[in-house]
Amino acid sequence: MDIIALIALAIGGALGIYLGRSLFSKGSTISRSLQQEIDEKEGRLRDLKTKISDSESRIRSAEAEAKATAKEVLADARLQARELTGKIEKDQVRLEEKERGLDQKVQELALQRTNLEKSQSHVKELETELKDASSAHRQALEKVAKLSTEQAKEQLAHELEAEFGEFFAKRIKAKEQEIEQTVEDRARDLMAQAMQRFASEVASESTTTAVQIPSDDIKGKIIGKEGRNINAFEQATGVDVIIDDTPGIIVLSGFDLARRYVAKLAMEKLIQDGRIQPARIEEIVGKMKEQVGKMMLEFGKRAVDELNITGYPTDLLKIIGRLRFRTSYGQNILKHSVEMAHIGRMLAEELGVDPTIVLEGCLLHDIGKALDHEVIGTHVEIGVEICKRFKIRDPVIHCVAAHHEDIPMATPEAFVVAAVDALSGARPGARKESIEAYFKRLRDLEELTKKFEGVQRAFAVSAGREIRVYVDTKKVNDLEQEKLAKSIAENIENELTYPGIIKVNVIRERRIEESAR
C-alpha cells in the first residue's frame, strides 16, 4: 500500500509539474499578444493626434484667410457704396434742375394758351364782323339788283346752261362713247384670250347613230319573223331602227341621246351574241340601261374632277352625268358646261371676281335640262330647285337663275356666267341646224318685228342674234322708241324659240331736207 501510495504521489507530482509548465507557457503567449495590441492602438492614437493637430493647423490658416478676404470685400463694398451714393446725389441734382426747367416751360405754355385764347376770341369777333358786313353787302347788292341770292344763282345757272349746255352735252356724249368703246374692246380682248387659252374639240351631236354589222345577213335576224325582233327592240329602247341598202351598217334614230346610246350598246351586244329574239332583246336592253346609269355617275365624277370641285353628293353627280346624254342644237350640254367652266374661270381671274362661284355656276347653269323632260317647268326653274335641294351656295344659285336674265343679275359672277354661256354657244361649230330651219328662224324674227306699228324695215343680222329695226320718225318719238324696243324683245321671248340672246336694236333716224334756190 505504501508503495502504491508513493507511486501515486510520484505520478501526481509529475502531472502537477507538467500542468504548471503548460499554464505558464500559455500565459506568457497571451501576455505577448495583449502587449502587441496595446502597442498597435497606441500607434494609432499617436497618428490620430498628429492628424488632429494638422487639421487644427489648417483650420487656423483658413480662418486667417477668411478674415483677410472678408476685410477686402468689406472694403470694396464700402468703396462702391460711396461711389453709388455720389452718383445718386448727382442724379438728384440733375432731376431737381429738370423739374425747375419743366416748371418754367409749364408757365410759358400757360402764358401761350392765354394768349391763344385771346387771339381766338379776337378772330371770332372778326368773323362775326365779317359775316355782318357780308350780309349787309349782300342785302345792298340785292336791293340794287332787285334779285335775291337764290334768284341770282338760278338766273346764272340758266345763262350758263343756255350758253354752254350743248358744248358740255357733246363732251359728255363723246366721253361716254369713248368709255363704251374702251369697255367693249377690253371685253372682246378678255374673251379672245380666254378662248385662246382653252382649246376644246368642236363637235356636235347628231340625231342618228350608226352601228357596224359584220355582214348583211344580220339584218334579217334583226328584223325577225314578221318584224317581231325589230318591233321589240324599238319598243324596249324607244328609238327607230333604220335598215336600208347601205352595206355594213344599220342606223339608230332618236332625239334622246341616252336612249340612242342604250340602243347602240344593246344592238352591239345582240349582234355579238347572235341570239336575237324578243325575250333576249328585253334582257339585254335592261342590262344596258343599268350600265348607262353607272356611266352617268362616272361622267359626273369626271366632270367635277376635271374642274377640281369637291363635296357634291352622289345623286347630284348622277344628274350632272345625265347632261352627257342631252344636247341643245346639236351641242352636248355636259361638254358645253365644262367648256364654260374653264373659260369662265379664266375670265373671273382676269376680272378679279370669285372664280369658284363662276366655276360652279357654269357647271350647273343647265342642270335643269337633265330633267326638263320629266319635270314641269323651264330648265332654269328646274335647275334652281335642284341646286336648292342639294344645298348649293346662294351665289351659285343666283348665277343659275340669272344666266338667261329670267331675274336681274345682281353679282359680277352672274354676268360672267351669262357672257360665257353666250360665248360657248356662239363659237363656230358649236351648234348646228338645217339651212331650212335657219332661214325660217330669220324670217319669223323679221316678220314678227314688222307687225309693230311705226316699223318701216327690219333686218335679222349676225346669224339671227340681232334684229335691226328702222322706225318712222313721224310715228315714233324718243320715248316711244324705248317702249317699242322693250315690246319687241318681250314678244320675241314669248313667241320664238332660239339659242342664246337676241339683241333688239331700234333705229330712229331723223332727216331734214330743204331746197336752196
Image (spheres, helix red, strand yellow):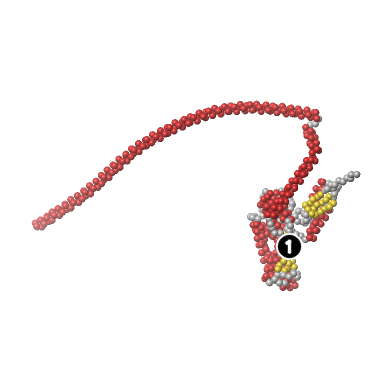
The quadrant in which residue 57 appears is: top left
**Position of residue 406 in the picture relative to residue 18 (left or right):** right
Residue 317 in view, yes or no: no
Residue 285 coordinates in the image, percent (x, y) = 69, 67
Residue 288 coordinates in the image, percent (x, y) = 68, 65
The quadrant in which residue 275 appears is: bottom right
Q: Amino acid at mark 1?
A: Ser
Outermost residue, front side: 517
Residue 95 in view, yes or no: yes
Where the C terminus falls, by quadrant?
Answer: top right
**Position of residue 317 in the picture relative to residue 468 (left or right):** left
- Give the answer, above or below, for where 59 lies relative to 342: above
For image coordinates 80% across by 54% down, the residue present is 460
Within 10 angstroms of label 1, few (less than 14), some, or many (20 or more) residues?
Answer: some
Q: Callout 1: helix, strand or loop? A: loop
Outermost residue, right side: 517
For image coordinates 79% across by 57% down, the residue present is 441
- Give the answer, above or below, for where 220 lies relative to 393: below
**Most foreground residue, 375 or 362:** 362
The quadrant in which residue 122 appears is: top right
How many tags in the picture? 1
- Give the answer, above or below, for where 75 lies relative to 272: above
Where the N terminus falls, by quadrant?
Answer: bottom left
For disc 1, the marked residue is 206
Residue 211 coordinates in the image, percent (x, y) = 71, 67
**Most foreground residue, 373 or 274:** 274
